[in-house]
């Protein structure tokens, strides 16, 4: 069942529909031999780029990639390697981000610091050392429609006459490790054409994160609204319970936050904690809250958590259920706060809020006393979990 849940979660994040004619209204199914659709798009270099700019290329690869997608992240290293090896051979590589940020749900951003806005493209490209054109199509998505972009990554290879000679996946691996590649399809196409040969396999099916169309925005807003209204089950927890959760062993990274409704900094920081919980919800991640409020009256705790949208998603409910629990929201009712401090974090100075990031085997990855900075917190979580899919974890 655990494997099934992980598989379903992955499908909701990454797999694309293989029925291009019905994936999005107006999506063109570009055929081998068709001319490259024209474009005029802003690049991260501040310039506007057009198809005519690349008229002298012997081979032109248009690669649809994105800032947020782990499959795209994994392929980028191999794309850069191909670019380096083809230098001076007339090979030109142009990357296009087809995604509209409004088409992305927060829980689809769990593999990146960035969303798919133009501003974040600039930051992401700088981080990754991109030295090729990276263009933005998210405003109208007209180019993605014209090329029939189903996913990131999705590549289209054109010859000197700008006729399509290959389309599909960059290769058959969604992992960063190049040893996992068994079929380097795009590379094979490039090498064949440069050698004056026919492309061995001209079409493959892309895999990765589905194109984030602006038309998805209404459904995403409805999803967030439903999440905001999710009830919260608040339970009591003693020192032994805290110790058991802190020991972990669940295979998930856990973020603990000790707080109280009467604590002003706790209240101020809480929206950032909820944002973090939602961002990493599709990954092996849990957000666990422990309130220092009076255990005799948990009603204010429940009301606060529900007001701030701290209810568990369906995936979160399944995770706690697999351990025989019903919630990740607790009020501490042990005899001594000092005992809780020792159980959760021996280096905790005592004041709240106190936040601890715990690895799958119970090791403390990061701790912070006082209100957290949301960006710093999410960066720490991403550092702990990584920006790629890892073989054997799904």
Image: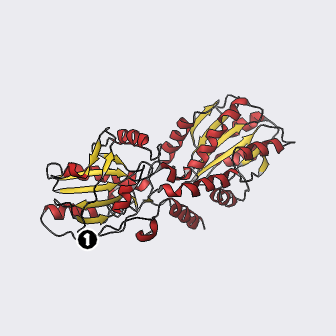
Residue at the image point whose x is 44% and y is 44% from the top? 117
Q: Position of residue 240 (x, y in %)?
A: 75, 46
Location of residue 64 with respect to 172 vertically, above or below: above
Query: In the rendered image, which quarter is residue 352 located in?
Result: top right
Location of residue 156 with respect to 265 vertically, above or below: below
Location of residue 280 with respect to 365 vertically, above or below: below
Mark 1 residue crowding within 10 angstroms, few (<14) / some (14–19) / many (20+) = some
Residue at the image point whose x is 83% and y is 44% from the top? 299
Display colour scheme: secondary structure
Look at mark 1 in the image and give the residue it sits on: 201
Q: Is residue 238 visible?
A: no
Residue at the image point whose x is 33% and y is 47% from the top? 41
Q: Position of residue 73 (x, y in %)?
A: 39, 51
Query: In the rendered image, which quarter is residue 265 located in?
Result: top right
Towards the viewer: 277 or 229: 229
Towards the viewer: 200 or 323: 200
In the shown orientation, is residue 264 left or right of residue 168?
Answer: right
């Amino acid at each position: 069942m655990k494997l099934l849940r992980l598989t379903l979660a992955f499908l909701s994040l990454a797999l694309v529909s293989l029925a291009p004619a019905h994936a999005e209204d107006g999506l063109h199914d570009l055929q081998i031999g068709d001319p490259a659709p024209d474009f005029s798009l802003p690049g991260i270099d501040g310039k506007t780029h057009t198809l005519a700019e690349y008229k002298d290329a012997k081979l032109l690869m248009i690669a649809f990639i994105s800032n947020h997608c782990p499959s795209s992240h994994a392929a980028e290293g191999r794309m850069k390697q191909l670019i380096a090896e083809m230098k001076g051979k007339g090979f030109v590589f142009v990357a296009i981000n087809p995604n509209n940020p409004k088409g992305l749900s927060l829980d689809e951003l769990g593999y990146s610091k960035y969303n798919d806005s133009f501003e974040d493209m600039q930051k992401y490209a700088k981080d990754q050392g991109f030295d090729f054109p990276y263009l933005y199509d998210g405003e109208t998505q007209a180019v993605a429609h014209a090329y029939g972009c189903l996913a990131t990554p999705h590549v289209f290879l054109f010859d000197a006459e700008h006729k399509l000679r290959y389309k599909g996946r960059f290769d058959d691996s969604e992992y960063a490790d190049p040893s996992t590649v068994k079929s380097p399809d795009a590379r094979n196409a490039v090498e064949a054409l440069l050698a004056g040969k026919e492309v061995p396999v001209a079409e493959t099916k892309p895999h990765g994160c589905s194109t984030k169309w602006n038309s998805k925005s209404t459904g995403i807003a409805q999803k967030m609204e439903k999440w905001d209204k999710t009830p919260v089950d608040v339970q009591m927890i003693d020192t032994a319970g805290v110790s058991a959760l802190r020991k972990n062993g669940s295979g998930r990274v856990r973020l603990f936050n000790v707080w109280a409704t009467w604590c002003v900094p706790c209240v101020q920081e809480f929206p950032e904690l909820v944002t973090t919980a939602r961002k990493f919800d599709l990954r092996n991640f849990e957000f666990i809250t422990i309130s220092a409020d009076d255990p005799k009256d948990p009603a204010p705790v429940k009301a606060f958590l529900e007001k701030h949208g701290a209810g568990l998603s369906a995936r979160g409910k399944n995770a706690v259920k697999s351990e025989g629990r019903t919630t990740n929201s607790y009020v501490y009712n042990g005899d001594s706060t000092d005992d809780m401090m020792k159980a959760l974090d021996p280096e905790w100075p005592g004041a709240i809020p106190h936040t601890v990031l715990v690895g799958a085997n119970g090791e403390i990855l990061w701790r912070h006393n006082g209100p957290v900075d949301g960006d710093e917190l999410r960066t720490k979580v991403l550092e702990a979990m990584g920006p790629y899919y890892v073989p054997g974890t799904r």
